[in-house]
Image (cartoon, rainbow, N blue to C red):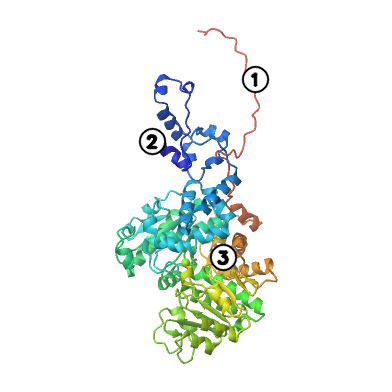
Amino acid sequence: MALSQLWFGLNRNVGAFLCIKPENCARNELAQQPVRHWHANIIKQDYRKVIDPKYNKGLGFTHEERQKLSVIGLLPCAYRTEAEQLYAANVNFNSQESNMGRYLYLRTLRSRQERLYYRFVSEYVEKVMPIIYTPTVGAVCQRFSSIYSSSMGLYVCKYDRGNMYHVLNNWPGKDIRAVCVTDGERVLGLGDLGAHGMGIAVGKLDLYTALGKIPPQYLMPVVLDVGTNNKMLLADPLYIGVREKRCTGKEYEDLVQEFMDGVVSSWGHETLIHFEDFATPNAFKFISKYQDNYCYFNDDIQGTAATGLAGFLAVERITKRPLNEHLILFVGAGSAALGIGKLVVKELMSRKMSAEEAMKNIYLMDSFGVVTKDRKDFILPDIEPFAKDMPPLTDLEQVVKELKPSILLGATGQGGIFTENVLRLMAQDQKQPAIFACSNPTSKAECTAEQAYNFTEGRALFASGSPFPPVLMDGKRLTPSQANNAFAFPGVALGAMCAKPHTIPDEVYLITARTLADYAVEEYPDSVILYPPVMDAANVAFKVGVAVAEYLFDTGLATKFPIPDDVCAFVSGYQYNTALEPALPVTWKYPEQPRISLPKDDTKECED
Ligand SMILES: O=C([O-])CC(=O)C(=O)O
Ligand SMILES: [Mg+2]
């Protein structure tokens, strides 16, 4: 093996610092081939620990550790403290010229020093989250084939049918407790990206660890590669996925079923299976098929629902007007809008309202106009209960003029659809119009923060799926909130992974929404923010995790026994510690055993 291959894993920025003293080589033949012998020795012994990103500390190895690991010389003599390593990572991150460059730098860091990577992400969450997650991850997914360099996750393709168990178990992690799977059919608001969906599965699980502090070795990102209908990808000579149109119908559903069963038989029924960015009809179909039979979670419907409802609870608090008295207009009738709409109904029903009363003020609008009772065909059965008895209205401005919504939520994937006129109309009728521009990434947002504030005289309560910077207006700094399911899924996953339920009921998402809304009230009592700032997202995840775990233990849904006395301490004990640990940690010691003096042996000769 070439020497370069060896130190490459240690720290790709360094060269070799090898000095073999002849006296270290006991025998002549070793002296003739010192380098080869030394390597073989290292690989057999501790070297694997050093090149494994889980253990690698780069320049953070102390001299003593380097001696134990036999890597003296493979690193320059400098030792860096944790703070210095973080500083170095920050310098490298900042020196990249583009967000894509920053993303690629961080991937390299992760593949080299996992703990340092998560430490860096946690420490600089505000600037790093938009890179490893929305919005930059959207650009990453679009270009995934051309930037592909290593697997990052597991690719299960339609030709793996019949061999699912085998393929799943090729994943190097043996104790998998959560899987984030996508078929890439609707990645963010970017449409069908086929196997490029791996980028979003990886991004979501990165936040499991960065925000939920869930140990990364329990996590597995998966793409179910069933082909793509994206003509550009099909024609791209570098496309990494199955170069065929998507398979559908029975063939598709049987593959998904085999995947579900493969996960359960590999890692148990309590393995959390997180579905991400499936097309809306499939997403709803799989919820009804799997929610009551698997530890199943759909982020775009259920995670987004919890986030959306939390925002509405904040609007209720800030405007001092009960939620059922708000008129809510959802523009877009896909996973996000329907998920939130249905959870709002659940929340209102928990306040002793009938389903009909709860739905009275919730309107859905899609590309055909407001959903009304005279529609012949509902693309999804979940839409029908929201249909209203009213004449058809197709133009958004007209709809806002007529209905006078106090909460306007866009989940359309159509950037800029909340025009100046729409926003001005909202401000005309409402003192504090609530505007949610939920589509991702930034280019798909229904309006920008600047537009929302400018066209409402700064009165809008604004939140968006992708982050926007604060806006200065008349000397006032207006800070938009981020309405992203990143405030929900890391906590839901943490709670579920701790309590190990076999199913996750809808109540969990109500609890998540209330916990998230309460967090903002507790921490920012006098503020008009709809969501806490992103720098609090890890604290939110912990609170949500504890609340979810408590609910699962209290209702007997948890399979984790014994039930912990202190759920908060239990959840905290489950979490990942990003502090750099010793390479060869001494976790316990044996006490010195009492010594018994040896019996005297005077015999000098053998007796016959
Ligand atoms: O990934 C995000 O930022 C939020 C989300 O689930 C989506 O837009 O599909
Ligand atoms: Mg999504």
Which residue type does callout 1 highlight?
A: Ser
Q: Position of residue 152 (x, y in %)?
A: 43, 53
Q: Is residue 258 visible?
A: no
Q: Tell which circle, 1 or 3, labels the residue nearer the N-terminal end.
A: 3
Give the residue pinned by disc 2. Answer: 2
Which of the marked residues, 1 or 2, is nearer the chain's N terminus?
2
Residue at image point 42% right, 28% down: 37
Seen in the image, is 214 located left or right of residue 144?
right
The local crowd at label 3, few if under 14, some if 14 to 19, many if 20 or more residues have their Cα within 10 Å, is many
Q: CA distance from mark 2 to mark 3?
A: 46 Å
Residue 406 on image: x %, y %: 58, 82
Give the camera-side residue of 559 and 208. Answer: 208
Would you name the residue on which mark 1 appears?
A: 597
Circle number at residue 465: none
* Foreground tag (1 vs 3): 3
In the rendered image, residue 397, in percent from the top left (x then y), is placed at 49, 86
Quadrant in the picture for residue 431: bottom right
Report the amino acid beneath label 2. Ala
Of the residues under marks 2 and 3, which one precedes in the sequence? 2
Q: Are marks 1 and 3 in contact (CB under 8 Å)?
A: no
Q: Residues within 10 Å of mark 2 (few under 14, many from 20)?
A: few
Q: Is residue 99 visible?
A: yes
Residue holding disc 3: 487
**Residue in the foreground of this view, choosing between 339 and 472:** 472
The relative height of residue 457 versus residue 606 in the rendered view (above or below) is below
Q: How packed is label 1: few (under 14 Cα within 10 Å), some, or many (20 or more)? A: few
Which amino acid does the dot numbered 3 rest on? Phe
Q: Secondary structure at mark 2?
A: loop
